[in-house]
Each structure stands twice: as structure tokens, then as C-alpha cells.
Amino acid sequence: GAVVSQHPSWVICKSGTSVKIECRSLDFQATTMFWYRQFPKQSLMLMATSNEGSKATYEQGVEKDKFLINHASLTLSTLTVTSAHPEDSSFYICSAHPTGSNQPQHFGDGTRLSIL
Amino acid sequence: AQSVAQPEDQVNVAEGNPLTVKCTYSVSGNPYLFWYVQYPNRGLQFLLKYITGDNLVKGSYGFEAEFNKSQTSFHLKKPSALVSDSALYFCAVKGSTLGRLYFGRGTQLTVWP
């Protein structure tokens, strides 16, 4: 089945550090990928829609300069949390939407980000 | 606008009993509906989807869901629950833009031995 690989799975770093998270579709091409943030025992909050070869579309209230998204190929999107602070600590999940409008999104296993 | 509602934060069932996790939807146009499951510190796993066709959709791990247009519902069901089914379940509806999904708030299912 379709697999999405998200790396790293866990990051602990100091305040002020920038952290890059990778999301790869391993066996399919994804023109569109999505980045979510999830707080404990809550639903997923869509942060941005990543489109291959073009700028990401950010949801209202999400700082685009804080959360940099790059979708340079049909199988890779990256999220960089710039100058991270403790309030950025969260669980970040990516998903990829295979070509074909009725295909389900496939999710990575998430990245637990802890900023000290 | 597309939205889904999961009215129960928590569902508790005994192992071997049937389970139901409720979901209602609101869409403009035809609904494309999905159920996902999330285990602790993991991403979401796809269980099943309804696009068109039979109202009873069968999915992974013995789960099924019944699409009811008149009640705008898409409840997830399983005839006999397992302890290993304990997880967080999300209902979602697909929006019109680039495959974006709108999620419910999630329902924590606990199956006790």
C-alpha cells in the first residue's frame, strides 16, 4: 500500500534552533502534501497545503515566515520550523494526496518536536 | 462549507461486543467520507472511505461504515471489538480544494478485556 515516510520521528532541541522535517511519498507521486499540527488528545489542525513547484498555501493564523514549506519534487515536502521556541513544541504530521481525486490521503507517522 | 461532527469524545466497550463510533457530516455537493485511526504517537491510518455506491462500506481490520444520506451520517462499526482496537478515531470529509480533508474532533475508543 501507499507509504509516507516522515523524518525525524522525534526532535529535542534548544530554543532558537531551526528544525527541518521531511515528508516523502515512497511509492507514489504527490502533487499535493499537507502539514498538520496536533495538540494532545485533539484533532489535527491544518497548517498549510504544499504544492509541488509552487508556493504553499497557509491557513489563517499560521506564520509563513515561521513555518517554511518547500515542495521541490513530487515525492518530497519539507517543513522548517525557524527559530523554534517552546510554544512550537507539538506533534507535526504530514500527509500526501496521490494523483487521482478520490484517493485517500496517506499520513506519515508524525514528528514529536520538543523545544527546551 | 464542509464539516464533520463526532458527538462523542469517548466510547467504551467490552471486548467481543459490537462497537459504533458516530459521525455526521455537512457538505455542499456529494460527500466523500473517510475514517482514520490513530495510535499513540503515530500518524493516521486509513480505514475506509465512501465515495459512491453501496451504503455499507467495508474497510481494514474488520471495520465497516454505513452511509446514511437522509441522516447525513457515516457511523463506523465493528461487530466484535478487540482490545487492540483501542485508539483515537477520526471521521473526515473531503473538501473541494486539492483534496483537503476536514476532520472531526476525534473519538477515543477504549475496549476493555
Image (tube, coloured by chain):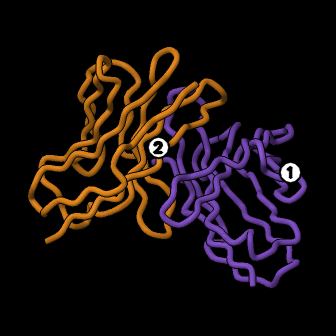
Chain colours: A purple, B orange
A80 with respect to B12 (left or right): right
Q: Position of residue B96 (x, y in %)?
A: 61, 24
Number of on-image labels? 2
The disc numbered 2 marks a residue on which chain? B
Disc 1 marks a residue whose amino acid type is Lys
Mark 2 is surrounded, within 10 Å at the Cα level, by few (under 14), some (14 to 19) or many (20 or more) other residues, namely many
B15 with respect to A88 (left or right): left
Q: CA distance from mark 1 to mark 2?
A: 25 Å
The part of the image, by quadrant, that contains residue A58 is top right
Disc 2 marks a residue whose amino acid type is Gly
Q: Position of residue B67 (x, y in %)?
A: 29, 26
- Residue tagged by mark 2? B104
The answer to whether the residue labelled 1 contacts the one labelled 2, judged by CB atoms less than 8 Å apart, is no
- Residue tagged by mark 1? A64
Task: Choose between B13 and A2: the one closer to the eye.
Answer: B13
The part of the image, by quadrant, that contains residue A115 is bottom right
